[in-house]
């Protein structure tokens, strides 16, 4: 007996059902970007390493930036986005931070004892396929009449909570 061809009505109904199933799956399934952002927003400890940056100071008059390759590592712990707080620990000691949830990650703000600011943003990076999160840290300082600014690029990883 020859195989019967499905009717155009059957094909139409199958097409509608397939479209509805795809729509439900798209709405019900969190995207990779949403999962990374949720994971970052739930982190309590981040280890951040910065290896390349640009800095400038006004000792010679104008701010003339230079590219630097070095290693700078610090840890943000006790991250509490509900309370907007965290602590940063690095080679220069520790500091209390303001920790802000952003649509693309977390921004940490340090106000130093001298009134200067350091900003660090950790991005969830939807296009990033590694476990690390892209990050940038910027220092905006004036010390004894000298303007010192820098911006460093690197990555952060979530550490298990102690």
Image (tube, rainbow, N blue to C red):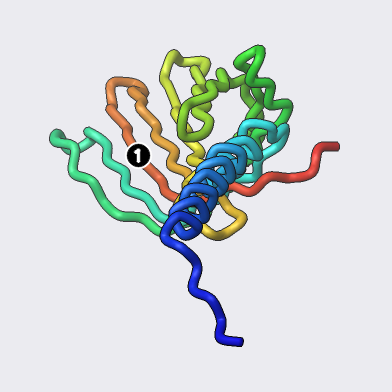
The answer to whether any part of residue 72 appears in the image is no
Q: Mark 1 sits on what residue?
A: 150
Q: Is residue 24 above or below residue 80?
A: below
Locate the C terminus by quadrant: top right
Locate the N terminus by quadrant: bottom right
Residue found at x 69% / y 35%: 43
Residue found at x 45% / y 55%: 9
Disc 1: CA contacts within 10 A as few (<14), some (14-19) or many (>=20)? some
Q: Is residue 93 above or below residue 133?
A: above
Front-lying residue, 23 or 139: 23
Percent coordinates x, y for residue 45 in the rendering: 71, 36
Where on the picture, by quarter, is residue 60?
top left
Q: Is residue 159 left or right of residue 25?
A: right
Front-lying residue, 78 or 57: 78
Residue found at x 56% / y 86%: 2
Front-lying residue, 33 or 135: 33
Q: Is residue 81 left or right of residue 160?
A: left
Percent coordinates x, y for residue 145 in the rendering: 28, 21
Residue closest to the far right? 162
Residue closest to the far front? 1
Q: Is residue 128 left or right of residue 86?
A: left
Count of picture labels: 1
The answer to whether any part of residue 28 appears in the image is yes
Residue found at x 28% / y 27%: 146
Percent coordinates x, y for residue 153 in the rendering: 42, 49
Identify the secondary structure beneath mark 1. strand
Q: Is residue 36 left or right of residue 162?
A: left
Percent coordinates x, y for residue 117 in the rendering: 43, 22
Residue closest to the far left? 62
Front-lying residue, 136 or 94: 136
């Amino acid at each position: 007996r020859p195989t019967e061809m499905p009717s155009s009505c059957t094909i139409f109904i199958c097409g509608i059902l397939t479209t509805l199933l795809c729509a439900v799956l798209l709405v019900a399934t969190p995207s990779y970007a949403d999962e990374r952002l949720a994971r970052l927003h739930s982190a309590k400890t981040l280890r951040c390493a910065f290896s390349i940056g640009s800095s400038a100071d006004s000792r010679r008059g104008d701010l003339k930036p230079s590219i630097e390759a070095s290693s700078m590592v610090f840890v943000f712990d006790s991250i509490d986005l509900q309370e907007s707080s965290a602590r940063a620990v690095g080679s220069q000691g520790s500091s209390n931070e303001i920790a802000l949830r952003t649509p693309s990650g977390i921004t940490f703000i340090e106000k130093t004892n001298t009134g200067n600011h350091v900003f660090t943003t950790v991005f969830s990076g939807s296009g990033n396929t590694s476990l690390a999160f892209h990050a940038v840290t910027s220092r905006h300082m004036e010390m004894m009449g000298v303007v010192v600014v820098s911006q460093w690029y690197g990555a952060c990883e979530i550490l298990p909570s102690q």
